[in-house]
Every structure is written in structure tokens, then in C-alpha cells.
Amino acid sequence: MVNNPTLLNFLFTFLVLWLLIVSILLWQNIRHYNRLAGGVKKQELREILEHLLSQLKENKRETKELRQWLKSLEEEEKFDLKKVGFIRFNPFSDTGGNQSFCLALLDGHDNGIVISSLHSRDQTRVYAKAITQGKTEGQQLSRDEKEAIQTAQEMAKG
């Protein structure tokens, strides 16, 4: 047994303060619980919690479906025209200005077309060539067409 009154007084004060702090925290938790579940019976609270859990599962399922849908859209998007290269030039010395052009329209896999327009004093001719993976099949590309394709590919990078 402790006969020191100062020590007993300190312990008693400490215990009273500790009890007061724990009581305040408990009262705050009870008040918070009552605000959350105020006016709700135990059975209703269980139903509410089960509904929230089922809603959470539904949200997870929908999120998974949305991710799959987004992934399929990203795959489809690779086939959209997204790379454009445009070059103007003067192929003939007897015409003024850069009236001729090459236009490259490519998708994410470098497939598409290159359109060339050659303008002279007498006429304008338009040519189109299919592009597969950045190259033509069976046709030669002119220097300007190659430059238009390269410009399209570079613009998509950065």
C-alpha cells in the first residue's frame, strides 16, 4: 500500500482525467452513431447495409464493364484518321507559287491514303495512293508524298 499522499493525489487526478477523456470520446462516438442510424431499427439498419453492399458490388461490376468498353474504344480508335501531313510544292519551273500539294491521311497503324495534286498552267491532276503501314503496294511514292507521310507520322508523335 502506498502511504504517499502526493502520489495518491496524482494517481487520483490522472484517473479522473483519463476517465473524462474516455467518456468524451465515447459520447462523441455514440452521438455520431445516432446521427448515422437515427430513427432506424436494427432490422432496417441491416437492410440498409445489405443494400449498400449490393450497390457496391453493382458499382464494381459496372466499373469493370466500363473499363472493358473503354479498352475496346481505344482499340477501335486506332483505325480513325489521326495523322495528317500536308506539303505544298512547285513541281514545274514554268508556274508560279506552290500550287501543288500532297496530303497524307493515316490512322494509328499508318494505314490510309496520300493524295497528290499537281498544278500546271494548263491543268491540275489529282492522284491518290493507298498506304499500308506507311508504304504503298505496287506504286512508287514521290519525294513529296514521302515527306507528307513522314510529316503525318511526326505530327502524331509530338
Image: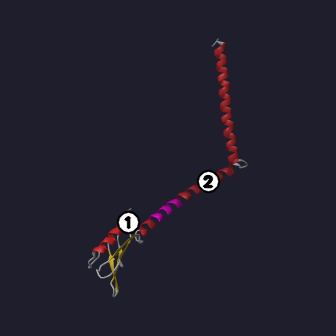
Q: Amino acid at mark 2?
A: Glu
Residue 133 seen in render: no
Which residue is at the front of the view, 149 or 70?
A: 149
Majority secondary structure in the magenta region? helix
Quadrant of the rendered structure where residue 97 is?
bottom left
- Callout 2 secondary element: helix
The residue located at (30%, 74%) in the rendering is 144
**In the image, residue 150 lies in the stretch drawn in magenta:** no
Q: How many marks?
A: 2
Left or right for 152, reference 25: left
Looking at the rendered image, the quarter that the N terminus falls into is: top right
> Of helix, strand and loop, which one carries label 1?
helix
The magenta stretch is 61-71
User: Which percent across, then down, holds residue 42?
Assistant: 69, 48
Q: Residue at x 70, y 41 (%)?
A: 31
| Image quadrant in which you'd find residue 76 | bottom left
Residue behind mark 2: 50
| Label number found at residue 155 | 1
Position of residue 8 measured from the top left corner of the image (x, y, whole percent):
65, 16
Please tell me which residue is depicted at 68% across the width and 47% down the height of the picture: 36
